[in-house]
Amino acid sequence: MTKILGIIGGGQLGMMLTEAAKKMSEYISDVIVLDPTKNCPAAKVGARQIVADFKDKNAIVELSLQSDIITYEIESGNSEVLESISSGVTINPAPATLRIIQDKYLQKKFLRENNLPVPDFVEIGSLDDAIKNIKSFGYPVMLKARRDAYDGRGNFKIENLGEVKQAFEQFNGRPLMLEKVVDFQMEVSVIAARNTKGQIVTYPVVENIHEDNILKITIAPARVNKKISEEAESIAKKTMEVLHGAGVFGIEMFVTKDDKVLINEIAPRVHNSGHHTLQSSLTSQFEQHLRAILGLDLGKTDLLHHTVMCNILGPKGFQGKYKTITIDQNVGVYLKMYQKDEVKPQRKMGHFNIVDINDTKDIQMLLRKAEEIKSLIKFIPA
Ligand code: ATP
Ligand code: MG
């Protein structure tokens, strides 16, 4: 029997989930997304859309009435409303898992209680609290909003005592946590999946390069030794064992200068650092997520070719409508634009994958090619 899939969020992740769903028509007959932006990316590839805020209770209930199975592309959905829905619709990952993950403090506490490695952190209730704890952590230190943060917008790196008050005030009463700054040699992540039957798989660990707190490049596989890659994959597996609920999860980690692996955060959803799987793997993370929540056997996760993924962000000085972006056909280059109506500075507009189809395993060459392709992509006002 086919199912109707509901997705909270219809941005690029919802779009690529919708595209994967359309290829699985023997299991999924229709996709409905809930998203506040009219004609969101997922709607452009054939999802039906309920236009409403992600946290809108009535809209979530409406989505649950129209769907057989609900999932999400963002972690800021209303977990309380989701937890209260009991009307025959399956929600995965479980709302209780979402509730823990969407609060960075509860998430880290949960990981630490399960003996998973995380940087030192503490909950912060007041400015005095912050000053006291910073003394024991030392500078620099990271003040983080516990909820509703993305692309680093909820983080403030405090370099000295003079900045503490300013950092605290900037968050304007939002619940906060404090975290030690990790002097990392590299940021890596593992995309992992768990299906409703409890089967767990992981994709090979990848390397992530951020700029201005936003993911810029993912290199698959990460340039780390075997011991580190095995450690990262084992941490990811263990994380999946302790988290309930099915689906794909993106597990972001730091590799410290002394080769330790610490979890930075978990995304309970498909993840930007997994976009390479669209071409580098037999099963993309999007198909894998659907297989996981439908209770199908999980697909293969081997990396077929080294791949570099490059995000296409809105240029800093331009906002508005833009001309369609295309590039000439180029072997091993896969451009994916998200069809967003307007470009904004630093907005994720698309990505491309550079696939090492000749299996040179020459990552420097792939990175150079990525720079070349990037220089061809220009946003021109429409
Ligand atoms: P995103 O949406 O990009 O995943 P986010 O807003 O949820 O991000 P984090 O993942 O907590 O924020 O942080 C964004 C980036 O800031 C990290 O990828 C890392 O580069 C840096 N960062 C965060 N916490 C720390 C830390 N404790 N030590 C060092 N760097 C950190
Ligand atoms: Mg992050």
Image (cartoon, rainbow, N blue to C red):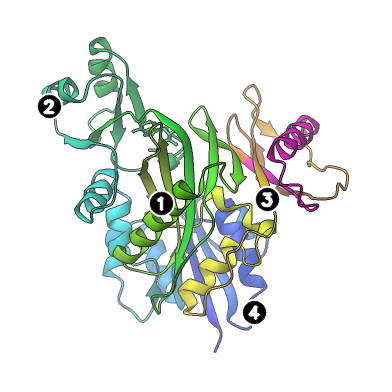
Would you say 66 lies left or right of 96 here? right
Q: CA distance from mark 4 to mark 3?
A: 30 Å
Q: Are marks 2 and 1 in contact (CB under 8 Å)?
A: no
The residue identified by callout 4 is 25
Number of labels in the image equals 4
Whole-percent x, y for residue 288 in the image: 55, 68
* Residue drawn at point x = 19 percent, y = 36 percent: 122
Q: Nearer the viewer, residue 335 or 356?
A: 356
Name the image quarter holding the C terminus. Answer: top right
Q: Amino acid at mark 3?
A: His
Q: Is mark 3 within 8 Å of ligand 1?
A: no
**Which span is picked out in magenta?**
349-378
Label 1 belongs to which residue?
231
SS of the residue at dot 2?
helix
Report if residue 372 lies within the magenta region.
Answer: yes
Camera-nearest label, 2 or 1: 1
Q: CA distance from mark 2 to mark 4?
A: 54 Å
Amino acid at pointer 4? Ser
Pick out the residue farthest to the top. Answer: 162
- Separation (CA) of disc 1 from disc 3: 20 Å
Nearer to us: label 4 or label 3: 3
How far apart marks 2 and 1 lie (CA) works out to 35 Å
Q: Earlier in the sequence, mark 2 or mark 1?
A: 2
Of residues 217 and 223, the one drawn nearer to the viewer in this rendering: 223
Quarter holding ligand 2: top left
Quick check: is the Cβ at mark 1 less than 8 Å away from ligand 1?
no
- Return the residue at label 2: 129
Nearer-the-camera pick, 129 or 277: 277
Q: Secondary structure at mark 1?
A: helix
Which amino acid type corresponds to the residue marked 1 in the rendered image? Glu
